[in-house]
Each structure stands twice: as structure tokens, then as C-alpha cells.
Amino acid sequence: MLKRKATKQLQDWKKTKNKKCLVVQGARQTGKTFIIRRFAEENYDEYIEINFKMTPSATEIFSGDLDVDGMVMALRFRFPDKKISPDKTLIFLDEIQECPEAITSLKFWADDNRYDVIVSGSLLGIDYKRSSSYPVGYVDYLKMHGLDFEEFLWGLGLSEDMIGSVRDYLLHKKAIPDAIHNQMMSYYRQYIAIGGMPEAVQVYVDSKNFIEVDRIQRDLLQGYQYDIAHYATAEEKVKAEKCYLSLSKQLLDKENHKFQYKEIEHGARAQKYYSSIEWLLSADIIQLSKAVSDIRYDLDDYAKSELFRAYTTDLSLLIAMKDYSLKQHLVENTLSGTTKGGFYECAIADALYKNGYTLYYYKNDTTKKELDFLIQKEGAVIPIEVKSGNTKATSLTSVIKNKPDISYGYKFVDGNLGISEDGIITLPLYMSAFI
């Protein structure tokens, strides 16, 4: 049973006085339903779960007046073995996008405040647009992703104090002992090959069987393609799928990782495909890193929306687009060239995204300066370069030297921790989980 950080967030929500309904968002198969069920079993006397896709007849509960007493009575008739007691029962509405009236009802549950209500759905953000009255101001949000590297380590059996000791090396800017560092790099390469989707991670933890992991990853990718076919408009279906499946070529097979429409099909243009990118973004199927024209706070003021890099929201989906043999190369560290650099860049993007950062990058063809990522933390810009080896970070050095408001930057490498006099903090790739 995998330990997830979302459990603590759910517990904090439960303790909140005058709590709102909780919307658990995220792409399919990130573990939303599982974590909510486990939380309900451990923290409530009873819980009621309605999956509107599995039992569409349950929409009748919300077809009349949406007063709470009326809805509770309808629930009692449907579930006669449940008491549905205030403060002791969790009501869990899954696949809620299939019942717009249930979305509307969240306002009334929140106003009443006697019952704890959690809702979820695979493409919640998109399908909320179908609701007759979206309950703005009456819901809180919890965003779930696949497992991050720290959660993956928990799954492998590493204790929090072991992981904390690794984090301490970052805090004190000290090199990690080789015995620990080499094992952490081994774990990290396993994580890149497996990704963070709970089902794939659980199978690996239980069996260490990469063939079975590969089968699950490909099933997950097919499921995402199904979501595109099922939820996208007729006009977007084919275009969105083509955009999505082009990501492995965009990120792993070429030096320039800027999203290029010509990689989707010959002669393709933004005018035809940009709406598909927006759809994939809204569906939590991709994340974007936008180019900026200048490296200064606030980066969003300098973002160029037409220039971006697109990443999958979990490494599982990217690896499933490629040949199975890549897993062995990743784990054994026998990759080289563009593919190796591309995977490491995607892994850092994955870590930053799961840590809640908005991603940007910088590239100036005139000055030849390029920074793989820019993030913002505590009102400051932090530049980042990713190296598949431990080569010089020329652009990073130049930016720190010439931008007085930027005091340091990170260089993530396939190597150990170190600090240079010019403000560059060199970190092992796996330390991206802790910044």
C-alpha cells in the first residue's frame, strides 16, 4: 500500500472548521479514488461512495430540489444500511463530471456544513463547464499527481529519516557520501523508467518486473488516448491525440525541445493545433514551460505564450511512447546523447511540476544563452540548467554574473553536490525532489 502526501492534506482539510466541499483534481489513474477511500475508512464511522459513471441512475438523487435534507433522505433510501450521520459520514461523489446537478449541489452542502463532501473526476476541470451553476467560493481544491520521487522512495521502503538525511546534505550544501549517492542515483534511474503512476509503482515494488510495469504503462497511455477520444470535441479528437503522441519525438529525439507543430505533421501550424494544446493542458494531460523574453521577476510578465515546451504530466506516459528497451538503458545508465539529456530534462520538469512550480525557460539565439528552466520562489527568480554529465553551465554562469537580482542558480547533474564561487549550486538529479 503506497504512502501518499495527499493523505496529510486530506487530514488537514478534515480538521478545518466550517470546511468547504473538497474537489480532488488530477489526471486519470493518479490514485485519487484509492486515496479518498482509504482516508474515509480511516477517519469516518462510515462513508458513501457514488460513481456517476458506474451508476448513472444515481443522478436522480440530484434531479429535484437541492436542499441538503432532501438529498440526505434520497441517499438513505438508496443506501438503507447507512446512517448518514452529521460529522461522522463522508460523502464521496466520484466521476462527478457526469452529473452537473451534483456539481451545483456543492454550494448547498458547503452552506449546510453538517456533512463532509469530497468529489473527484478524471477530467473535472473540463467537464465543470457543463454544470448549470458552478459553486465558486464553496469548494477547496487538492491537486493530485502521480508519485513524486520521495513517495517512490517510501514505496521502496526508505524511511522518512533516511530521506531526511539526504535532504540535509542539500540544506548544509555538503557532498553526499558515495555509498548513499550511488544508491540514490540507482533509485532515481529506476524512478525515471517507471514513472509515478501508482499502479506501475505498486507492481514494481511487489515484483521488480519491468515487463509487467511496461504493460501497465502502455495500458495507461491507451487510457489517456481513450479520454481524449471520449471527452474531446469531434473537431479536437484527432488533433489532440496527434499532439500528445508527438511529445516523445519533441522531447527525446531532437536537440531543440521547443514544441514544434511540424513534428505533428508536415506543414502543421499553430492556427490548426494550438486549441488542441489548450485542451490537453486543461485536461491535466500535459504541462507547459513557457519561453520568456527576459530573466526577471515576475516571469509571467515576460512569457511568450506562442513559444513553449510541452511535457507529459507523468514520466510513465512518456516512457510508454517509446520502445521497451529504453527502460534497461535508463536503469543501467547506458543512454547517451540527445535521448539521455531529454529524459533528464523531462525528469526535472516532472519534479518541479509536482512540487507546484510554474515552469519557464529562456533561449536567446543571438547571444546563444539558454536556460532549461526558470522558477520563482519567495519573490525571486531561480535559473536552472540540466546536464546529462557534469559539464560547464556557461549560460547559468553568465546570468548570475550579469543579473544583480539573481544570486544563485541550480545545475542538476549526473554527479554529486557542490558549490562554485559564482553562485552555481551543483546538485545530483534526484535532489530536484527537495527544492
Image: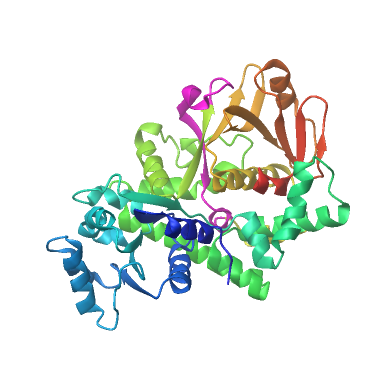
Res. 33 in view: yes
Extreme-right residue of the structure: 178
Extreme-front residue of the structure: 17
Decide if residue 181 is on the left or right side of residue 272.
right
Taking depth in this image into account, of 190 and 265 the one nearest to the observer is: 190
Number of marks in the image?
0
Rendered position, 217 above or below 234: below
Q: Is-magenta flag for residue 281?
A: no
Colouring method of the image? rainbow
Res. 335 in view: no
Extreme-bottom residue of the structure: 81
Give the percent coordinates (x, y) of residue 324. 63, 62
Rendered position, 271 above or below 201: above
| Residue at left offset 19%, top offset 68% | 61
Q: In which quarter of the image is the C terminus?
A: top right
Rendered position, 80 above or below 150: below
Give the percent coordinates (x, y) of residue 154. 66, 63
| Residue at left offset 35%, top offset 39% | 275
Give the percent coordinates (x, y) of residue 133. 20, 48
Q: Quadrant of the N terminus?
A: bottom right
Q: Is-magenta flag for residue 306?
A: yes
Taking depth in this image into account, of 197 and 273 the one nearest to the observer is: 197
Q: Give the extent of the magenta segment.
A: 292-321
For residue 388, which quarter of the picture?
top right
Give the percent coordinates (x, y) of residue 345. 64, 42
| Residue at left offset 45%, top offset 50% | 285
Taking depth in this image into account, of 32 and 228 the one nearest to the observer is: 32
Decide if residue 232 is on the left or right side of residue 277.
left
